[in-house]
Image (spheres, coloured by chain):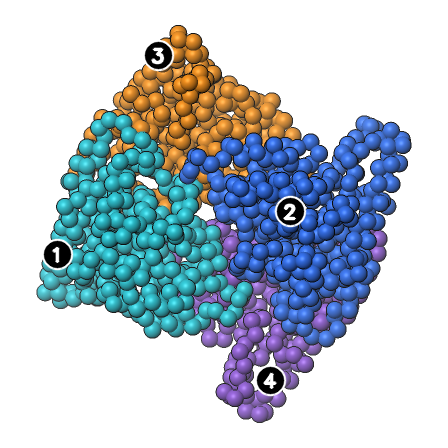
Chain colours: A purple, B blue, C orange, D cyan
Amino acid sequence: MNFASDNTAPVAPAILDAIVEANRGFAPGYGNDDWTAGVERRLSEIFERDAAVFLVPTGTAANALALAQVSPPWGAVFCHAQSHILTDECGAPEFFGGGLKLVGLPGDDGKIALATLQTALAGYGGHSPHQVVASALSITQASEAGTIYRTGEIAALAELAHERSLAVHMDGARFANALVRLNATPAEMTWRSGVDVLSLGATKGGAMAAEAVVIFDRDRAAFMGERRKRGGQLLSKHRFIAAQFLAWLANDYWLDLARHANAMADRLAERLAAIGLPPLWPVEANLVFVTLPAATQFVPSPET
Amino acid sequence: MNFASDNTAPVAPAILDAIVEANRGFAPGYGNDDWTAGVERRLSEIFERDAAVFLVPTGTAANALALAQVSPPWGAVFCHAQSHILTDECGAPEFFGGGLKLVGLPGDDGKIALATLQTALAGYGGHSPHQVVASALSITQASEAGTIYRTGEIAALAELAHERSLAVHMDGARFANALVRLNATPAEMTWRSGVDVLSLGATKGGAMAAEAVVIFDRDRAAFMGERRKRGGQLLSKHRFIAAQFLAWLANDYWLDLARHANAMADRLAERLAAIGLPPLWPVEANLVFVTLPAATQFVPSPET
Amino acid sequence: MNFASDNTAPVAPAILDAIVEANRGFAPGYGNDDWTAGVERRLSEIFERDAAVFLVPTGTAANALALAQVSPPWGAVFCHAQSHILTDECGAPEFFGGGLKLVGLPGDDGKIALATLQTALAGYGGHSPHQVVASALSITQASEAGTIYRTGEIAALAELAHERSLAVHMDGARFANALVRLNATPAEMTWRSGVDVLSLGATKGGAMAAEAVVIFDRDRAAFMGERRKRGGQLLSKHRFIAAQFLAWLANDYWLDLARHANAMADRLAERLAAIGLPPLWPVEANLVFVTLPAATQFVPSPET
Amino acid sequence: MNFASDNTAPVAPAILDAIVEANRGFAPGYGNDDWTAGVERRLSEIFERDAAVFLVPTGTAANALALAQVSPPWGAVFCHAQSHILTDECGAPEFFGGGLKLVGLPGDDGKIALATLQTALAGYGGHSPHQVVASALSITQASEAGTIYRTGEIAALAELAHERSLAVHMDGARFANALVRLNATPAEMTWRSGVDVLSLGATKGGAMAAEAVVIFDRDRAAFMGERRKRGGQLLSKHRFIAAQFLAWLANDYWLDLARHANAMADRLAERLAAIGLPPLWPVEANLVFVTLPAATQFVPSPET
C-alpha cells in the first residue's frame, strides 16, 4: 500500500485495456480521430451542454491553459493560498498567462469563503492602470485539503465573481471524488453554478495521463487550439489520450473509481481516528490529513 | 496503408507491452521511479556520455524547451526555412523562449549549407543592443525534406556556430532514421560533431508519446527540471513515458524500426520513380516527396 | 553637420520652450493633467476622429505596444524585411507580444507590394493549429528606405489585410515627412485608408522623447493603459511628454519641421547625384541612401 | 501646495537648466554620448565602485529590468506586501521577468524583518521542481511607509539572502531621502551591505524622468543593454536623460533636495501631530501617513 499520492497508483484496468484497444490500425493524428470526437460528445452529454474540450497530458497544463484563456497578462487570479496552481506548478500559470498574478487567499479548510473573496475584491478597481485587474477566480474541487464546495457555495462565489467580471475556473483534479460525495450532477457542480471553465482530471482518478480543459461557452474557446499547440500540449497520437477518457467515462467507471477511493479514505480516517489521530479537516474526498506524532513524522512527498 | 504521417501509425508492439508491464504495482511519481533512472542510464550508454535527460510527451515541447534552455529571449536561433520549429509549432519556440526570434535560412534539400550560415552570421554582431543576438543553430536530422546531414557537415556547421558562441541544437524527431542510414554512432552524429542539445523523438519511431531532451553537458541542464515543470510537461505517472523509451531502446529495437521504415520509403520511392514520379529530394530517411500530376493532387495533411 | 541619424539632432526650440513652460507649478501625475488631455483632443482634431492616444518615450515601445494590442501571441505580423521592428528593436515586438512572430517580406524600395502580401497570405490558413495565425500587417511610413506609400497603396494593402482579418499598423516614426510630401490629410493617410493603429513619432521630428500610439477605434484600446503601465512606459511626470507633443502639433510646426528636413534631404541628394552618387531609392522623405566608393565607405551607424 | 505625490512637483531648476544646456549641437544617440559616459563615471565615484549603469525613463522599468536581470522566470522574489513592485506596477516585474513570482511578506512599518524573511525562506527548497525557486530579495529604501532600513538591517537581510543564493535588489525611488537621513555613504547603504542591484530614482527627487539601474558587479550586467532595448526603454536622444542625472548628482544637489523634502515632511508631521494626527509610522523620509477623521477622509490618489 502507498499513501503518498494518487500518482503512484497503477492505471485502472479498463483504461489500460482501452489504450491497447486503440492501437488497432491507423488513425488521423492531432485529435482528428473518432476517439477524440467521442470524448467531446460524451462530456457534452455528461455536462448537459455543448462544451469545447481540449485534452492535455498534465493537470498543470490544463490549469495553466485554462487560466491563460480567461485572464489577460495584467490580470489577478484569486485562488486559495494552498492551491496547487499557486504552490506546486512552478509558476506555470504565470508562464502560460504571460505574467499574470496569482493572489492567494486564506481559508482554513482549503476553501475560499465568500466573505474572504469579497474582502479581497474590495482592494481591486479604482487604481487603474497601476494595479493588476481582478480577472478570475480559481477554486479547487475537491480542495487541496480534501474538502468539498457545496453547489450553493460555488454559486455564491461565482455570482460575486461574475458581478465583478471575473471568470470562474475550477481545478477539478479530483472532480469525480467531489461529485460522488456531493450527489450533484456534473452540470450542477459546474456551469449551472457559474463555473466557466473546468480542468477535469482523469489521471489521479485512474488514467495514465489524461486531463481535459472543458470550456462551457464555446465562444470563450477561440484559439484555444493554437494556445495548446504552442504550449507543446497537443499530442500527435491523440487517440490514446482520448481513449483513456472514453474508458474512464464509460458506464460510470469514473464515478465507481472515485467512490472506491473515497471509501478507502473514509476507512483510513476512521482507523486513524480510532488510534488517536483525527483528521485535520473533514474527509470529504480521497485525501486524509493528520498530524503525526514527532516519532513517526516524515518529510511530505512532493507529490500532490 | 496510410502515407500521411508517422503519427497515424499504431504503437510498436514491444512498446505497448512495456506500458502494460509498467502498470504492475505502485511507483513514485514525477520521474522518481526506476524506469526513468534507467532511461537516463541507457541513453548515457548509447551516447557514450553522462547526459542529462528530460522526457516530455511531445516533440514540440522537446524542441521548445531545448531552445529556451540554450538561447536567451533576445537571441536569434538560425534554422531552415522549412524547419518544423519555424512552420509547424505555432510559435512554441517563441513562447517557451520568452520571445526569441527564429531566423529561417534557405536550402533546397531541407539542409542548411555552411556558406548559408556564414552569410547569415555575417549580418549579426556589431549592432548591439539594437539587434537580437545570434545565439543558437538548430538543424533537423533527418531533415524535413527527408535528407540527412553527414557527420562532417554537422561538425563544420557546429564549429562555425561555436566560434560565434552559438549553441547547437538538433531536432531529432527522425533521429533513428538518420542514424541507421548514416551508419554513424549516436555520439558521432551528436556531441562528437558539436551538437549541444538533442530533441530525441521516439513517437514517430513507434512510441505512443515519448520525446527526450538530451543535454550532453550537464552544466547546461541547470533548472531544466523547473523549466519543464512550469511548461506543464512533467508527467505525474512518469514511469509510463520512461517505459516507452526503455522498450524502444532495448535490443536495438529503435534501430530495427527505423531500418524498416527507411526500407519502406525506399521501396515506395522506387515504385513511384518507375511510374514516372521521381522523388523531389534524395530519399535518405523515411520521407518521400514527389510532385503529383494535377489529377491526383491532394491537399497535404497538416501532420508532419 | 551630422548625417548619421535624426536622433543626433537637438530638440526643436519651440518644443524645448514648451518643456520649460510646462514646469510652472504642480500638476497631476501619470497623464491626469491638462497637457495630456490636450494632446488627445488635438490629435483627434488632426485625424478627424475621436482616437485613443497613449504617449510613450520611445518609438520601439510605441511599435511593440501597438502590435501587442492588435495581435495575439500566436499571431504572425507581416512587415518589410528591412523594417525597424524586425531589424532594430532587439525583439521588442516579440517580447511585448508574448512571443508573436514577425514575418519579413521582400520589397526593393522598402515597401511591401500588394502582390507580395497576397503571396505571403496564401501560405497562411488551413493548417490550424500548427501554424501561427496571420494577424497583422505593419507598414512603415515613410519607409526605412525613405520611400512613401501612396494613399491608394495603403488602401489596397489594408483592404486585403482586412479581408483576411488582419489588423493594420503603421510605423510612423517619420509620419510627418511622408505627410507633407504626399499632400494628403492625416486621416487619408491612416484610418480612411484602413490603418487601425498608428505609431506616431515626434522624436525624429524634433521632440526630445515623445511618441504616441494612436488607436482610431476606441474599442480596440481596451486595457492599453494597463499594457503601457506594465511595460514600464507610463511616465509619472507625464505633462512633459504631452507638452512636447502639443508644441510639435501647434501651428503646423510639425509639418514645417518635416518640410525643412525633406528639403535638406532633397538638396543633399541633388548634390550627391551631381558628383556621381545618385540615390539608391527615390528620395521621398528625409532619408538619402547612396553607395559610396570603397575609399570613402564607412560602417553605418547603429542609429536608425 | 500639493501633498498627493512627488510626481506632481515641478522639475528642480538646475535639472531643467541642464536639459536646456544639453540641447546645444549634435550628439550621438542611444547613449553613445559624453553625458551618458559621465553619469556612469560619476555614479561609480559616488558608490566607490566601478558599476554598470543603465538609464531608463520610469521607476517601474528600472525595477522590472533589475529584477528580470537577477531572477529567472521560475524565481520567487521576496518583497514587502505593500511594496510598489507588488501593488503599483501592474505586473511589470512579472512581465519583464517572464512570469516570475513576487512573494509579499508582512511587516508593519513597511520593512521586512529578518525573522520574517527567515520564516519565508524556510518554506522554499526541497520541493523541486514543483515549487518556484527562491531567487531574489527586493527591499525599498526609503520604504513605502516612509521608514528606513539601517545599514545593519540591510546587511543582515542580505547576508541571509546570499546564504540562500538570492540576489538582493534595492528599490531606491527615494534613495536620496534615506541616504541623508541615515548619514551613511551610498556604498555603505548598498553593495557594502550586500545590495547587488539598485534602482536609483531621480524623478521623485527632482528630475523630469530619470531612473538608473545600477549593477555593482559588472559581470551581472551581461546583455542588460539588450534587455533594456527590447523593453523599449533605450532613449534615442539619450543625452537628455543623462544630463538630468549629471545635474542632479552635481555638487550634492540631490542630497540638498532630499534634505529639503525630508525637512518639509518633518514639519508637516509635527504640525499634524500638534492637531492630534500623529504619524502612523516613524517619519524618516519624505512620506507622512496619518489616519484622518472620517469627515476629512479622501480617496487616496493613485500616485505613489
Badge 2 crowding class, 10 Å Cα cut-off, few under 14, some 14 to 19, many 20 or more, is many
Query: How far, Cα to Cα, is label 3 from label 2?
Result: 56 Å
| Secondary structure under the numbered disc 4 in the rendered image | helix
Cβ atoms at labels 1 and 3 below 8 Å apart = no
Kindly identify the amino acid type of the residue bearing the numbered disc 4.
Answer: Ala
Looking at the rendered image, the quarter that the C terminus of chain B falls into is: top right
Badge 3 crowding class, 10 Å Cα cut-off, few under 14, some 14 to 19, many 20 or more, is few
Disc ID at residue C267: 3
Is residue A109 toward the left or the right of residue D153 in the image?
right
What residue is pinned by disc 4? Answer: A269
Who is closer to the viewer here, B156 or A252?
B156
Query: How far, Cα to Cα, is label 1 from label 2?
Result: 68 Å
Kindly identify the amino acid type of the residue bearing the numbered disc 2.
Answer: Ser
Who is closer to the viewer here, D168 or B127?
B127
Badge 2: chain ID: B
Residue B302 showing in the rendered view? no
Tell me which corner region of the image, top left, top right, bottom left or bottom right, holds residue B276: top right
Residue at 10%, 61% (x, y): give it: D271
In front: mark 4 or mark 3? 3
Disc ID at residue B193: 2
* Tags 1 and 3 both on a single chain: no
In front: mark 2 or mark 4? 2
What residue is pinned by disc 1? Answer: D263
Query: How far, Cα to Cα, is label 1 from label 4?
Result: 64 Å
Q: Where is residue D139 in the image (x, y as percent from the top left)?
A: 31, 61
Who is closer to the viewer here, A263 or D177?
D177
Badge 1 crowding class, 10 Å Cα cut-off, few under 14, some 14 to 19, many 20 or more, is some
